[in-house]
Amino acid sequence: MTKIVSGGQTGADRAALDFAIAHGLPHGGWCPTGRVAEDGPIVLKYQLMETPSTDSAQRTEWNVRDSDGTVIFSISPELRGGSELTAKFAGAYLKPCLHLSLEAHGDAAPELLRAFLNKHQLRVLNVAGSRLSEERGIELFTRQTLLAALVNRP
């Protein structure tokens, strides 16, 4: 894997971008015009391009379209809202997609992510998932899984 893309929303998106920056990985992706997120404008340290629309669905679609595959992080095993839409776009674009849930996968999540990346030989990984207001703890789960899967390999 050579690059992480994400949409810049709070929660899983932001955790992935922060992880990439902290570990010197290239990052990017699409965000809605005006850099809109639930906590205000997305700061410029995140190297995101703005879509023509303020509709987050366009950002979601374009990040799926422009990546080699997607991982969706959640606490609950059920996909909802934007996470569910992400999975639908992955299917429509015939892109590999993995859903990792803390409740369903727990400590197995890093190994599942490593296997997914190896199986599909992904170069550009789209990281999506719950926003902070929907699932507390999603940033920590996302960050810890990425760290264990990509940096602290056994």
Image (cartoon, rainbow, N blue to C red):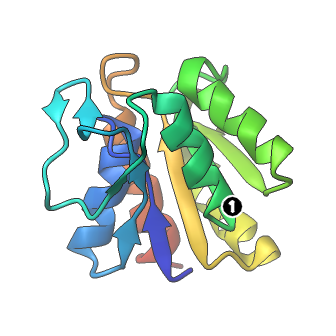
At horizontal 38% and vertical 29% (from top left) the residue drawn is: 54
Q: Position of residue 64 (x, y in %)?
A: 63, 52
Q: Position of residue 102 (x, y in %)?
A: 54, 34
At horizontal 33% and vertical 30% (from top left) the residue drawn is: 137
| Quarter of the rendering containing residue 124 | bottom right
Residue 93, compared with residue 76, is above or below; it is below
Residue 79, compared with residue 88, is above or below; it is above
Callout 1 crowding tier (Cα within 10 Å): few <14, some 14–19, many ≥20 = many
Q: Label 1 belongs to which residue?
A: 69
Asked which secondary structure carries label 1, the reply is strand
At horizontal 46% and vertical 61% (from top left) the residue drawn is: 5
At horizontal 65% and vertical 23% (from top left) the residue drawn is: 79
96 or 117, nearer to the observer? 96
Q: Position of residue 61 (x, y in %)?
A: 62, 43
Give the left or right position of residue 136, taking residue 110 as reference.
left
148 or 127, nearer to the observer? 127
54 or 66, nearer to the observer? 54
Indicate the amino acid at tag 1: Gly
Count of numbered labels shown in the rendering: 1
Give the left or right position of residue 131, taking residue 60 as reference.
left
Residue 60, compared with residue 108, is above or below; it is above
Q: Position of residue 47 (x, y in %)?
A: 27, 64
| Quarter of the rendering containing residue 132 | top left
Q: Can you name the residue that lies furthest to the front here?
A: 52
26 or 137, nearer to the observer? 26
In which quadrant will I find the N terminus? bottom right
Residue 112, compared with residue 100, is above or below; it is below
